[in-house]
Image (spheres, rainbow, N blue to C red):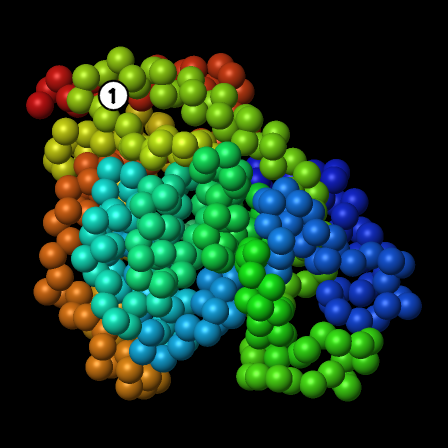
């Protein structure tokens, strides 16, 4: 997945454009900036590439989620449905607004199970946050139908799935709102950065204002601008946006390298009885950033991960035991451990996740391994890796 593997001339040139003028901020300083507007340029390029009417860059993927929710008017006490398998940023962004994260089971797509989503809806539900984990998506038609039926918003967290598509459309462009992260380990990186995508003009207007202290961005005197509502600072810098411009121009190359490497590894594993690949909904195409599969049992999955490590096959994740990506280790959320007092709405309405039954998620995540697909491997390395993986997994399953 990581674009940081291929950082080079193009990135340096873009950054040097910014360093030459010294204008590191995306707004203002028109006369000094040698016509370089890296954030604006990257927004335009993303808008075209992702077939989305509006794109607004922010400082991180977490900021993008927060700004996206805020731009749609999500606030204290509103319920946002999110998966049990994701990154902590999902509930962080929801809690930042005083809204309530409602955890819901995942299925064999490793993303939201539409049936479980349906059951979690209450009169307070406002948003379904679909997180396209490890490069692939939920059944978005089914989630959209639920949203239509109940008047909810569909928000796509496409932070791990840039370049993937569903029904021919780029992930991130399908829901009412979409979010990308460009942190250092994502498919393309800005160092730190994120983006909000939407076809909704009003949400876009809210997003660019909210992420810049409420600035209306009218006219060319920042100090004289008005502040129609309360905002915050989630701005991206020109330096970060410059790196992103270079990386976006290489996205298609990155995806095709990933696809090639993924396919070699997948073919090597498909012969093994007992290995079941993660399911991708009809009409979906992954971005090939991970090869994710299930073993016959939790015990075998754990054994396989250890054995792969011993065989020096690095980058295979067992998310079930991971501190950051699965609900089982989110005791800071479960126990509401915050530095200061949480909003009353959160204290009253956050479900008791210690008592929750997510065995349907455990059934899948407990047996899953996800192996990172790297860009820098030589063809020989990929083949060697695929061969070693296949041998290790075959032995583990046969030994059972
Ligand atoms: C990385 C990531 C984020 C957060 O992005 P940052 O830029 O690191 O804040 C959110 N959601 C998912 C699924 C991610 O993988």
Horizontally, residue 241 falls left or right of residue 72, namely: right
Q: Is residue 349 above or below residue 365?
A: below
Q: Is residue 261 above or below residue 171?
A: above
Query: Residue placed at 42% from the left, 17% from the top?
Result: 264
| Quadrant including the C terminus | top left
Residue ranking furthest to the front? 149
Q: Is residue 17 left or right of residue 26?
A: right
Q: Is residue 236 visible?
A: yes
Judge whether residue 66 can be spotted in this image.
Answer: no
Residue 291: percent from the left, percent from the top? 37, 30
In the image, what residue occupies the spot 15% across and 47% down?
Answer: 360
Residue 261 lies, in percent from the top left, at: 47, 23
Image quadrant assignment for residue 237? bottom right
Observer-nearest of 207 and 167: 167
On screen, residue 391 above or below 255: above
Secondary structure under tag 1 reads helix
Q: Residue at x 12, y 49 (%)?
A: 359
Residue bearing mark 1: 392
Nearer the observer, 311 or 334: 334
Image location (x, y in percent) of residue 320: 23, 46
Where on the image, by quarter, is ligand 1? bottom left
Residue 223: give x, y in percent of width and height. Answer: 76, 85
Number of marks = 1
Residue at (13, 17) in percent of width and height: 398
């Amino acid at each position: 997945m990581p674009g940081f593997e291929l950082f080079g001339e193009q990135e340096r040139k873009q950054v040097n454009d910014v360093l030459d003028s010294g204008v590191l901020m995306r707004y203002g300083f028109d006369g000094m900036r040698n016509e370089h507007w890296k954030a604006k340029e990257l927004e335009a390029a993303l808008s075209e590439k992702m077939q989305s009417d509006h794109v607004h860059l922010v400082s991180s993927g977490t900021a993008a989620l927060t700004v996206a929710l805020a731009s749609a008017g999500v606030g204290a006490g509103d319920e946002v449905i999110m998966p049990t398998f994701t990154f902590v940023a999902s509930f962080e962004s929801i809690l930042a607004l005083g809204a309530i994260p409602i955890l819901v089971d995942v299925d064999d797509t490793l993303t939201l199970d539409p049936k479980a989503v349906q059951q979690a809806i209450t009169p307070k539900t406002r948003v379904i946050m679909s997180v396209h984990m490890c490069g692939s998506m939920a059944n978005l038609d089914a989630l959209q139908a639920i949203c239509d039926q109940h008047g909810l918003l569909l928000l796509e967290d496409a932070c791990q799935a840039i370049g993937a598509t569903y029904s021919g459309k780029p992930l991130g462009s399908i829901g009412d709102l979409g979010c990308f992260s460009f942190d250092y380990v994502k498919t393309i990186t800005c160092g730190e950065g994120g983006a909000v995508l939407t076809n909704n003009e009003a949400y876009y207007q809210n997003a660019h204002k909210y992420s810049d202290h409420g600035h209306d961005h009218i006219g060319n005197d920042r100090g004289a601008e008005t502040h129609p509502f309360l905002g915050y600072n989630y701005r991206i810098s020109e330096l970060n946006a410059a790196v992103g411009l270079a990386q976006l121009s290489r996205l298609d190359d990155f995806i095709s390298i990933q696809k090639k490497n993924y396919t070699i590894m997948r073919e090597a594993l498909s012969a093994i009885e007992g290995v079941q690949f993660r399911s991708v909904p009809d009409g979906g195409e992954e971005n090939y950033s991970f090869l994710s599969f299930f073993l016959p049992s939790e015990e075998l999955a754990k054994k396989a991960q250890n054995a792969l490590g011993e065989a020096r096959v690095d980058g295979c994740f067992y998310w079930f035991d991971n501190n950051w990506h699965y609900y089982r280790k989110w005791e800071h959320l479960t126990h509401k451990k915050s530095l200061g007092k949480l909003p009353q709405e959160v204290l009253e309405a956050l479900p008791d996740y210690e008592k929750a039954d997510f065995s349907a998620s455990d059934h899948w995540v407990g047996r899953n391994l996800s192996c990172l697909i790297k860009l820098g491997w030589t063809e020989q390395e990929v083949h060697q890796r695929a061969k070693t993986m296949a041998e290790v997994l075959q032995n583990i399953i046969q030994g059972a």
